[in-house]
Structures are given as C-alpha cells and as structure tokens.
Amino acid sequence: MTGPGMKTVRIHTTLALLLGLVFARSAFGAAIDDRISEQKKQLALLNKRIEYHSKELAQAKKKEKSYLRELSVFDHRVKQSESQIELLDLQIEKNEDEIARLNEDIGVHQKKVDELRAMLAQRYVAIYKYSGVSDLNVLLSANDLADLNNMTYLLKRLSRQDENVVEELKNEILALETDKLNQEKTQGELVMRKKKRERERESNTRAGAQRRELLERIDKEKSVHLAAMKEIEEDQRALQKKVDELLKKRAAERAAARKNNPSAPVPTPHSGKFIWPVPDRRITSNFGMRVHPKFRTRSQHSGIDIGSPKGTPIKAAGNGEVIFTGWLRGYGQVVIIDHGGGYSTVYAHMSKILTDEGQAVKTGTLIGQVGQTGVATGPHLHFEVRVNGKAQNPLRYL
C-alpha cells in the first residue's frame, strides 16, 4: 500500500537525485563553456589576422609578387580552419553531453509520470467503486462532534492530496515534453555542427594543399626561389630589429624600476646555459651558412632546426620573461623570451602558442607546440639563442 509518507520519501529521493545531477553537470558545463569562449576568442583573432594579411598581400601584388605574404595567408587559413574545427569539437562535445543529460532527465520524468498516473488510477477506481458512499459512511460513524470534525479535516486533506497529485502530474508532463523538445533541438544542432565540421576539414585540406604547392614552387622554380630568398632575408632583418627593440624596451623598464626602487634585489645574471626546448635532438638544419642543393644560393641560418612531430610540447630553455608572442612572416608563430644578462631565445614555426607576453617562465615551462607555420616544409622547431640581440650558435649554449 502506498501512503503519503512513502510518497514524500519518493519525492525527496527524486529531488536529491536531480540536484546531484544538476550540480555535477553544472561544473562540467562551466568548464566546457569556458573552453568554447576561449576558442571563439582565438578564432576571432585569427580572422582579424587573415584580413590583415590578405590586405597586405593585395597591396604587395600591386608592386611585386610576395610569396611569403601569400604563404602567410595560407598559414592563417589553415590555422583558422583548425581553430574552427576545435571549436566545433567542443560544441559537439557539449551537445552530446546535453543529449545524454536530457535522456537521463526524460527517464526520471517518465518514471515519475508513470508513478503518479498509477497512483491516480487507484484513486479513480476507488472513487468510481464507492461513489462517495464511503465518505458518508465515515462521517456517520463519528461518535461525537470532535470526531466528526477530525474526519471532515482528514477527508479534506485527502481531497487536497488528490489535487496536489494531479498538479504534480501536470508539471511532470510539462517537464517531460520540454526535455523532449530540447532534446530534438540539440540533436538538430549536433547534426548541423558535424556537417559543418566536415566542411571545415575539407577547407583545411584545401588550404594545406595550396600551402604545400607554394612551398614546392619556391623550392623548384629558380625565379620564385630567388624572390622568396629575398623576402626571407628581409624577415631575418625584421626579426633582428624586433629582438633589438624588445630588449631595449625591457632594459629601459628594468632601469626605471631600479630608479623607482633602488633597494629592490638585482636579478641574478643568466648563466648562458639552456636546456633543449624539445625532447628530440635531431638537428635537421645547423646554424650558419646554408647552400641550396639545387640553386646553390647561400643564406645565413640564425638558429638550428630540430625535427619533431607536430604537437610536441615546447618548453622554455631557461628562466625569463616572455617578451613577444605572435606571427612573424616567414617564421610563422613565434615566442621570444628575455632571460636577462643579454640572453634571449627565439622559438619559431609553432603550431600553437601556450603562453602570453609578460609572463614569467621557469626552465621547462610549457610555452607552445611544434608545428610548421611560416617557411617550413615539415614540422620542426626553429630555435635561436641571442646574446645582446645577436644570433649565436645554440649548440654552444645547450
């Protein structure tokens, strides 16, 4: 037999279960929403960069063809589609979690609806069977006025309980129907996003193919190669200028800080010894003069290239402060760290930057991942050690 006490226990149990699910999922939902928000910011930044480099390319074409600017646009398109795919992956994960949650909620609401319907069915059978005679018999069996008042009160409570059960059933049915509608809507979003992800993957493949074709042209056609070499030399000078400016600015900031606070401790000068920034130690291109095997052109290589799979973690080679993060034509995604004492390190061709300008880093701090952005035919890390802004052979310091 089901009494009011048992009903209350069931309601409390159901509420506890629902609350537990809500709190557990709210924590997960907040985490994935934060990741989605961050990915949207990255995508917006990439869209701005594509717009900037596309305009730069259009202006350059009016004067002379710029192969590295064109390569930079392809780089950004590849990164844009990769970022869009990551965003869609997160949104799909959220949709799938939402569908799983709705399935559980639908099960809970359906079970409650079945229980309430069964309870009301028993009451309706009793009402139909006795047609109110039982209530009259109860009242006539009262021994005195107080007994009659108690019985009247209990019958009213029973009637109100029936009304409450009906109202609860209405609410559960409404919740069930709402969950089913939300489930249908979320399922539609999931299908749409999966189709969009597939289109983005195709776009990523096309942009990657265009990038490879341009790199092959630079490597195979002498006129294109010579034009690209000229741009690469310009990029090396631009990097030199960038490092000089950043170090000069940082030195001025340190001098101003010491002037404002003469008693502040002076940082310990860097020893000039660095760890390898990636686990691999396979050097694919050494520091110094490089000669092209086909065209015999000579170019200065200001660092070493360390072959590593795409996505390999890149770590700070020493203690210091990140003074630059961003894109540099020819170098792709770049991080520059000032280690003090005139020492700085450069990390280029990254697939992802995982640090921010102004961040203090320790030896071994994760700062990014290996990639092949910029003029890079395969995944590797271009690593430089600079002393007072001038590039040195990194092998002397590792």
Image (tube, helix red, strand yellow):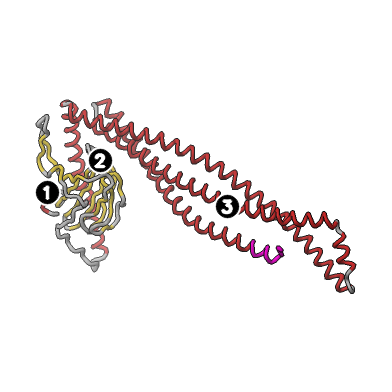
Between 260 and 390, which is closer to the camera in this rendering? 390
Q: Quadrant of the C terminus?
A: bottom left
Residue 2 located left or right of residue 22: right
- Residue that carries the numbered disc 2 in the rendered image: 372
Prevalent SS, magenta region: helix
Quadrant of the rendered image containing residue 326: top left
Seen in the picture, residue 107 relative to 62 is either above or below; the reply is below
Tag 1's secondary structure? loop
Residue 134 located left or right of residue 191: right
- Residue that carries the numbered disc 1 in the rendered image: 393
Q: Nearer the viewer, mark 2 or mark 1?
A: 2
Residue at 21% x, 57% y: name it.
Answer: 318
Mark 1 residue type: Asn
Between 207 and 13, which is closer to the camera in this rendering? 13
Q: Nearer the viewer, mark 1 or mark 3?
A: 3
User: Horizontal and vertical percent for residue 313?
Assistant: 27, 51
Total numbered badges shown on the rendered structure: 3
* Residue range highlighted in magenta: 1-10
Tags 2 and 1 touching, CB below 8 Å: no
- Residue that carries the numbered disc 3 in the rendered image: 105
Tags 1 and 3 touching, CB below 8 Å: no
Q: Quadrant of the N terminus?
A: bottom right
